[in-house]
Image: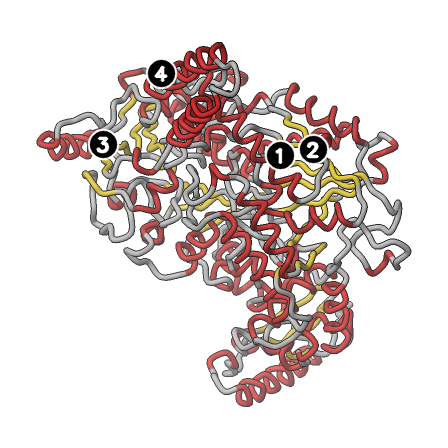
């Protein structure tokens, strides 16, 4: 039996339609084509005219339904000729969200890496079945490391052979000795080639140790070698913060081929940690050209983490431009971007899908589809905040018409109108603001982020590096101490590689001169002799670049950073006896690249949680680099919490995540905001100043050349400014936290 509802109108500035339910299925109709009527509302620009056409379409649809019209038959006619339903959905979503490249979004980089590795493995196996070589273009950097790990696992555990694989790497620094730990020769062998059965003669990596007069000839030969093998079957890519692919920086031509090129300053800055300072990063490289990459039969680009979200949006949604080299990939018919949630977070389909489509109609079975599929309270909060900031109106000023014109009228099915929805979201945000980060005694807990009891809490703060705590939550630490809570701080790693050798030489000179000036007052001959021996060893370590964790130089740097951490924490009122240095083993490589987490790392974290039995845990949730120290430190905490969550003391523990000097939480993710007074801002700044080795110019500044205190203050002021724009009271600054729920 035919059952249908009366058609209704859905108006949206971007794309409007009529909808109704037919035999329990929701049907959308955008124009009169399916019923033989010349009605096209979306071709019109004037709102009044669009609504007139929509009303005509609605009346015509009702007439057709009353006369036994079956919309499914019309839909099947339109669908005829499409090979796969998923393909049509993907194409439809791409059109709706204005995407110019195929994308797949996965929960995290581990899952995305396994998907990419499987595609590569399947290609290798398919080539083996027909007796042909598989020609791969490979990338370096942090993005493909997990892909290579999965390929190694497949080789060891599943017998995947690479004997028919021929590889061409994208690029190499120049000048660069291939045996250098900074070379891409070293990187590829350490992360892949040494662990699989690929033939040595089948590995082609650009040579970085050529004389300048030979580079042009070599590049032409490299290009010819690829062509002689029939071209690349698959090219694996990462993407840099400038949008570069390979070392094709902004300004690279689409027609460019393998060549010598200059490296952008931002790209050098990103590599500075690996090279122990930007001054050590080469300024030139040999790279495959854009056209060389585009000649590949298939391209997979990987992007992980929030640091890539801006360039991903520009590459996927904006027209191709030499300013954004990755956007040239739009010209390739078989390119796919594999992304995690963080790197895709600026895309239309993630940041504001409701503006483009009724989100409740997106296919929930498609893993790569939109991440927002229903109007639950969190998504309503996200959308209302987006609308308020977009229209530059406080939340309580938003109207029904604002909702309707921006694809949010479906919210009315839950909250009836804008007024009710505004009040709901306003209250949700208001309840995140508190001057009592440890909970306000005898207060209504339903309207505050933290519990009122116990009145005096044990608070354990994990700080990955020795300065992350004061940079990220210095004001909150002081509030916790002043409000009577028992505050403990656990510094997870030494951070010793972030100390300049020049600072060490200065410290030595200060100590030597101090001894000289007081030697007449004290009997210091033995001490002077011993210290001279120690200083001599340190200077030799510096000269020979001995970065071993057991070197005297490394131990000296560790001691300096520990002393700075103690000075900063005690300045905020933390008891010196409550400060611990965990010295987690994964960090002790002496290099920016760290080891994987071990059971020993997790055991160290678990023991301090068991010892303190905290009511609150604060941890760094700043994960811009998926292979960085912060991520490993947080994973150790998460694994420890998972192991301990059944313990009685964990059942009454809240876990709060803060962010460092790099990123801040999106305002819709914030569960607790702590306002700071002018005095607290100044005191926080002074506590950051205690970290003298990180002041003025830290060894690893990242993309932001400002000092850490400047970044922190700007970020805290920006958070306060966002709350004001949404209609809340004006604060000077706010530190923000997101709650991690493990039970």
Asked where in the image residue 729 lies, by quadrant, the reply is bottom right
Element type where label 4 sits in the image: helix
From the image, state whether disc 4 or disc 3 is nearer to you.
4
Can you identify the residue that label 1 sits on? 566
Tell me, for residue 576, which label it has, or none: 2
Residue drawn at (26%, 35%) of the image = 282
**Which comes sooner in the sequence, label 3 or label 2?**
3
- For the residues labelled 2 and 1, say whether their Cβ atoms are less than 8 Å apart: yes
**Which comes sooner in the sequence, label 1 or label 3?**
3
Element type where label 1 sits in the image: helix
Distance Cα–Cα, label 3 vs label 2: 49 Å
Q: Is residue 719 above or below residue 244?
A: below
Distance Cα–Cα, label 4 vs label 3: 28 Å
Residue drawn at (50%, 80%) of the image = 40
Viewer-proximal residue among 180 and 286: 180
**Which comes sooner in the sequence, label 4 or label 2?**
4
Can you identify the residue that label 4 sits on? 540
């Amino acid at each position: 039996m035919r059952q249908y509802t009366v058609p209704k109108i859905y108006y949206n500035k971007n794309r409007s339609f009529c909808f109704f339910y037919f035999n329990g299925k929701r049907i959308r109709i955008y124009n009169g084509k399916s019923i033989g009527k010349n009605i096209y509302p979306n071709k019109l620009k004037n709102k009044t005219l669009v609504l007139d056409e929509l009303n005509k379409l609605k009346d015509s649809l009702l007439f057709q339904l009353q006369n036994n019209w079956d919309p499914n038959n019309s839909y099947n006619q339109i669908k005829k000729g499409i090979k796969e339903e998923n393909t049509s959905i993907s194409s439809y979503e791409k059109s709706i969200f204005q995407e110019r490249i195929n994308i797949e979004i996965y929960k995290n980089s581990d899952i995305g890496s396994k998907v990419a590795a499987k595609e590569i493995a399947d290609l290798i196996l398919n080539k083996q079945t027909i007796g042909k070589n598989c020609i791969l273009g490979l990338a370096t950097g942090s993005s493909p490391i997990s892909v290579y790990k999965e390929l190694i696992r497949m080789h060891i555990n599943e017998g995947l052979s690479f004997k028919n694989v021929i590889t061409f790497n994208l690029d190499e620094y120049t000048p660069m000795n291939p045996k250098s730990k900074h070379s891409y020769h070293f990187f590829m062998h350490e992360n892949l080639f040494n662990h699989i059965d690929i033939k040595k003669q089948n590995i082609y990596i650009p040579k970085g140790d050529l004389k300048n007069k030979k580079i042009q000839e070599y590049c032409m030969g490299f290009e010819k070698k690829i062509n002689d093998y029939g071209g690349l079957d698959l090219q694996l890519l990462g993407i840099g913060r400038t949008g570069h692919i390979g070392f094709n920086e902004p300004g690279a031509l689409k027609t460019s081929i393998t060549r010598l090129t200059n490296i952008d300053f931002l790209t050098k800055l990103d590599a500075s940690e690996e090279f122990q300072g930007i001054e050590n990063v080469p300024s030139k490289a040999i790279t495959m050209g854009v056209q060389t990459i585009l000649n590949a039969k298939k391209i997979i680009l990987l992007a992980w983490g929030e640091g890539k979200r801006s360039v991903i949006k520009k590459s996927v949604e904006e027209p191709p431009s030499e300013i954004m080299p990755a956007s040239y990939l739009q010209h390739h018919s078989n390119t796919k971007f594999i992304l995690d949630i963080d790197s895709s977070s600026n895309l239309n389909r993630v940041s504001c899908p409701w503006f483009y489509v009724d989100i409740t109609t997106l296919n929930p079975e498609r893993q790569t589809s939109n991440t927002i599929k229903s109007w639950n309270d969190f998504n309503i909060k996200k959308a209302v905040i987006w609308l308020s900031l977009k229209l530059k109106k406080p939340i309580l000023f938003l109207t029904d018409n604002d909702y309707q014109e921006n694809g949010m009228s479906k919210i009315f099915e839950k909250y009836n109108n804008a007024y009710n929805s505004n009040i709901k979201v306003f209250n949700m945000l208001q309840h995140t603001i508190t001057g009592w980060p440890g909970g306000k005694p005898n207060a209504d807990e339903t309207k505050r982020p933290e519990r009122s009891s116990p009145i005096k809490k044990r608070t354990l703060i994990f700080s990955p590096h020795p300065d992350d705590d004061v940079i990220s939550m210095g004001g909150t630490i002081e509030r916790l101490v002043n409000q009577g809570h028992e505050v403990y701080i656990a510094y997870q790693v030494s951070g010793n590689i972030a100390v300049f050798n020049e600072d060490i030489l200065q410290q030595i000179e200060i100590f030597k001169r101090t001894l000289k000036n007081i030697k007449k007052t004290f009997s210091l001959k033995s001490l002077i002799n011993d210290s001279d021996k120690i200083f001599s060893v340190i200077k030799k370590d510096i000269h020979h670049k001995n970065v071993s964790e057991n070197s005297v130089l490394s131990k000296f740097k560790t001691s300096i950073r520990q002393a700075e951490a103690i000075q900063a924490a005690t300045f905020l009122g933390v008891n010196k006896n409550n400060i611990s240095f965990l010295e987690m083993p994964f960090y002790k490589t002496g290099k920016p690249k760290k080891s994987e987490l071990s059971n020993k790392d997790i055991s160290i974290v678990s023991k301090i949680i068991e010892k303190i039995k905290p009511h609150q845990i604060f941890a760094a949730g700043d994960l811009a680099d998926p292979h960085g120290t912060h991520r490993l430190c947080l994973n150790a905490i998460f694994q420890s919490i998972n192991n301990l969550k059944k313990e009685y003391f964990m059942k009454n523990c809240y876990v709060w995540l803060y962010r460092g000097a790099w990123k801040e939480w999106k305002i819709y993710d914030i569960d607790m905001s702590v306002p700071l007074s002018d005095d607290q801002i100044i005191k926080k700044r002074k506590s950051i100043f205690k970290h003298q080795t990180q002041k003025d110019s830290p060894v690893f500044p990242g993309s932001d050349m400002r000092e850490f205190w400047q970044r922190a203050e700007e970020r805290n002021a920006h958070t306060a400014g966002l709350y004001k724009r949404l209609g809340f009271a004006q604060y000077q600054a706010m530190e923000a936290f997101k709650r991690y729920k493990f039970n």
